[in-house]
Image (cartoon, grey):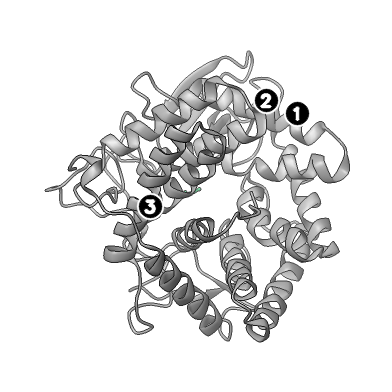
Amino acid sequence: MKPIEEYKEISDKEINAALDFAEKMVLKNLGEFTTKFQKAYSENNFYEPVDNTDWTGGFWTGEIWLAYENCLRNGRSEDAIKLRSAAEIQVESFLDRIENKIEVDHHDMGFLYTPSCVAAYKLTGNEKAKKAALLAADQLIKRFHPVGEFIQAWGPMNAPENYRLIIDCLLNLPLLYWASEETGDNKYRDIAEKHIHTAVRNVIRDDYSTWHTFFFNMETGEPDHGATCQGYRDGSAWARGQAWGIYGMACAYRYTKQEDYIEKFKNVTGYFLEHLPEDMIPFWDLEFTDGDDQPRDSSSAAIAACGMLEMCKYLNKDDADKYRSIAYKLMKSLYENYAVHSYDESNGLVLHSTYSNHSPYNTCNHYGVDECNIWGDYFYFEALTRMVCDWNQYW
Ligand code: GLY
C-alpha cells in the first residue's frame, strides 16, 4: 500500500450517489424479497430468494431499514411507507422464527435480530419487533458458559469440540445491552460484559492479528488454544475476523468504557491496515497481498469502515480525524472499484466478497467466493449512512 496520505476520500457527491443507488436497489428488490430474504451470498452476482433460516436474514431487513431512513431524510415519504411495510412483514417472520425456535441454536441472535427487530423498534416503536428481539436475547444468553465466561458460538452445548467462542460474536452482544436497557434486567449486560473481557483477552495475538475461534478447557475454563475455521490457516489472520475485531472493539469500548480498549482498537485496526493491498480492499485472508491469485473480501473493508466511524465518537479529535479519514478512503475504493453501479451487473450492492473459502488448512466449506455477500452490502450501506447523519445506530 502507498502511504495512507496518498489515498483520496470518498466525496459528499459520491456518498449521496451511493446512498441513492442503494435505496433504489433495495426498492427494486422488494418484489422478490419481502416474504423471502436475500441469500447469504450471490451466485454470479445475483442473490436468490430464500426463507428466513440462515444466520444472515437480518442484514437484508437491515438494508430495508437503512433505505427507509434514507427516504425519510430525503422527503420521499411514499417510498418510505413501502419500505416500512416490507420490513414489518419481515419482522413478523423474525417473531415467528424465534417463537418457533427455527434454526436458532447458535450465537448469531445479534446478527439476526439487531438490524431487523432492534432497528424496527428504535425507528418505529414496533412492539412485535421488541418482543422478538427480547426473545432472541433470552435465547443468546442460554449459550453462556460460566466456566470460562463466554458465549459458545456453534453446536450442541457442553461438548469439548464446541467449547469455544469466535471473534464475530462481539457484534452479537449489542443485542444484550439493548435487552438490559429495555427490561431493566442487568443479566443480559453482565453476560455480554463477561464475554467481551474473555474474548478480548484471548483472541488478540501478540502482533495484534486475531484468532477466528478460541477454545477453553471445559473443566477449568482455562484458555486452551486458538484455531481458524474460515481463515487460510490457524496462524494467519482471516480478513473478516480482523474486521469483526475492529467493529467489535469499537462496540466493546462503547459499552464497557474500559480505557485500554481504545489502544486495543488501534492495535487491531493497525494490523488490518498494515496488511492491505494497493487498493486498500483486503484479500480474504490478510496473509495474501498484491500478486497473490486469491479472492478479495470487500465486506471486510465495509465492516472495518463502520467500526472506525463508530470509534471516532469516543476518540480525541486528532485520532477521530485520523480514523474517519481512513474510513472515507476505504469507502472511496469500495465505491470506485467494488460497488455495483447498474442493475444489470447484480441485485446486490458490493461485488468481490468472500464468505467461505476452503483451503488445505481450514475446516470450512467452499461457497460465496468472489460474490456479493449480504453483510457486505449491509455494512457498506451502514457506513454511507454514518457519513451523512448522526446515525442512531442499530447495534
Ligand atoms: N459470522 C460469519 C462470517 O463472518 O462469515
Spot occupied by residue 102 in the image (x, y as percentages of width and height): 70, 59
In the rendered view, tell whether residue 122 sits above or below residue 271: below
In the rendered view, tell whether residue 297 sits above or below residue 221: below
Spot occupied by residue 142 in the image (x, y as percentages of width and height): 75, 38
Spot occupied by residue 113 in the image (x, y as percentages of width and height): 68, 55
| Whole-number angstrom distance, CA of label 1 to CA of label 3 | 35 Å
| Whole-number angstrom distance, CA of label 1 to CA of label 2 | 6 Å
Residue 97 visible? The answer is: no
Q: Which residue occupies the foreground of this view, 212 or 158?
A: 212
Residue under pointer 3: 328
Q: Work out which quarter of the rendered image holds the N terminus and state it.
A: top left
Contact? badges 3 and 2 (CB < 8 Å) = no
Decide which of tag 3 and tag 2 comes sooner along the chain.
2
Q: Amino acid at mark 2?
A: Lys
Image point (53%, 31%), residue name = 161
Q: Does 381 sit left or right of 6 as displayed?
A: right
Residue under pointer 2: 194
Q: Amino acid at mark 3?
A: Tyr
Tag 3: Cα neighbours inside 10 Å, few (<14), some, or many (≥20)? many
In the rendered view, tell whether residue 41 sits above or below residue 276: below
Helix, strand or loop at mark 2: helix
Q: Amino acid at mark 1?
A: Asp
Tag count: 3
Q: Which residue occupies the foreground of this view, 218 or 203?
A: 203
Helix, strand or loop at mark 3: helix
Contact? badges 1 and 2 (CB < 8 Å) = yes
Contact? badges 1 and 3 (CB < 8 Å) = no
Residue under pointer 1: 190
